Image (cartoon, rainbow, N blue to C red):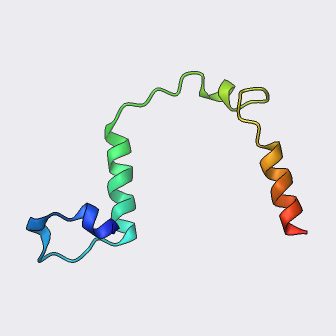
């Protein structure tokens, strides 16, 4: 399915991209787009709305 999304009808003779090719294309895209991370450090600190303690607790319980 991923190959179908990445290839159009004109690309039928070309080999399907490898996962590494897809990753390189994604990283190249991120490098071209301006991103603003202002305030992101505060959002991930304690009380920043991303409390993963319950998720970690469930993971520990399922490992037992």
Compared across the picture, whether 30 is left or right of 55 comes to left
Q: Quadrant of residue 39?
A: top right
Question: In this view of the protein, which residue sits in the foreground, 30 or 54?
Answer: 54
Question: In this view of the protein, which residue sits in the foreground, 56 or 41?
Answer: 56
Residue 62, position as x, y percentages in the image: 84, 65
Q: Quadrant of residue 53?
A: top right
Quadrant into which the C terminus falls: bottom right
At 39% from the left and 69% from the top, the residue drawn is: 19
At 36% from the left and 42% from the top, the residue drawn is: 31
At 13% from the left and 69% from the top, the residue drawn is: 11
Look at the picture and state if 37 lies above or below 61: above
Which residue is most to the left? 10
Question: In this view of the protein, which residue sits in the foreground, 2 or 21?
Answer: 2
Residue 16, position as x, y percentages in the image: 26, 74
Compared across the picture, whether 31 is left or right of 64 comes to left
Q: Quadrant of residue 63?
A: bottom right
Compared across the picture, whether 62 is left or right of 33 comes to right
Look at the picture and state if 62 lies above or below 32: below
Look at the picture and state if 16 lies above or below 51: below
Residue 57, position as x, y percentages in the image: 86, 52
Which residue is most to the right? 64
At 74% from the left and 30% from the top, the residue drawn is: 45
Compared across the picture, whether 40 is left or right of 55 comes to left
Quadrant into which the N terminus falls: bottom left
Residue 8, position as x, y percentages in the image: 16, 63
């Amino acid at each position: 399915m991923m190959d179908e999304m990445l290839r159009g009808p004109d690309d039928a003779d070309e080999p399907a991209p490898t996962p590494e090719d897809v990753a390189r294309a994604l990283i190249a895209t991120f490098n071209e787009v301006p991103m603003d991370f202002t305030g992101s450090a505060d959002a991930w600190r304690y009380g920043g709305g991303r409390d993963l303690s319950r998720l970690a607790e469930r993971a520990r319980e399922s490992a037992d």
